Amino acid sequence: MEVSLTKISQNGQVVIPSDVRKDAGIKPSTQFLVFNEDGNILLKPINKESLRSDMMLLDTIRKSEDGIKKGKSTKADTKMADEEIDDLLMS
């Protein structure tokens, strides 16, 4: 994992340091989804292959959060494989 220091300009622009861009394979004109989760900013590069699965994941998370608010729960066995737990949680 690359760690670098940067700052925001007066125009709201942030430079992603070259070593981080290189390590992540980010090229000029790359578009990003920008998330703000409790003040933690996440940039997710957009590409055609992952956009559909990302949107489906966001929908699943939203549905899960609604279920939690309604008091719904699911029990998983610690002996289950990761894929089985994912399927259980995503259904």
Image (cartoon, helix red, strand yellow):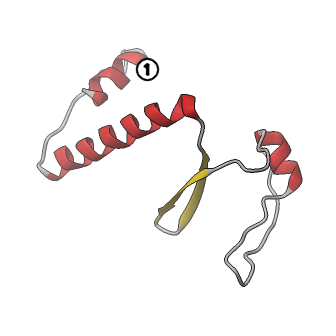
Q: Residue at x 76, y 41 (%)?
A: 24
Q: Quadrant of the N terminus?
A: top right
Q: Tell me residue 54's x, y (percent).
A: 46, 37
Question: For residue 55, what is the image quadrant?
Answer: top left
- Is 66 on the left-hand or right-hand side of 28? left
Image quarter of the C terminus: top left
Look at 80% across and 54% down and name the residue there: 3
Residue 26 against residue 10 in the figure, above or below: above
Q: Residue furthest front?
A: 29
Residue 11 image position (x, y, % from top left): 70, 80
Tally of marks? 1
> Considering depth in this image, is 11 or 58 the residue closer to the camera?
11
Q: Is residue 8 left or right of residue 33?
A: right
**SS class, disc 1:** helix
Residue at 57% over, 62% down = 41
Relative height, residue 81 to residue 86 (above, below): above
Amino acid at pointer 1 = Asp
Q: Quadrant of residue 89?
A: top left
Characterize the local packing of mark 1: few (<14), some (14-19) or many (20 or more) Cα atoms within 10 angstroms: few
To which residue does mark 1 refer?
82
Residue 40 relative to residue 87: left or right: right
Specify whether 61 is left or right of 81. left
- Which residue extends farthest bottom? 10
Q: Is residue 57 above or below residue 42?
A: above
Among the 4 quarters of the image, the one containing residue 27: top right
Residue drawn at the location 11% of the way across and 49% of the way down: 70
Image spot of residue 74 (x, y percent): 21, 32
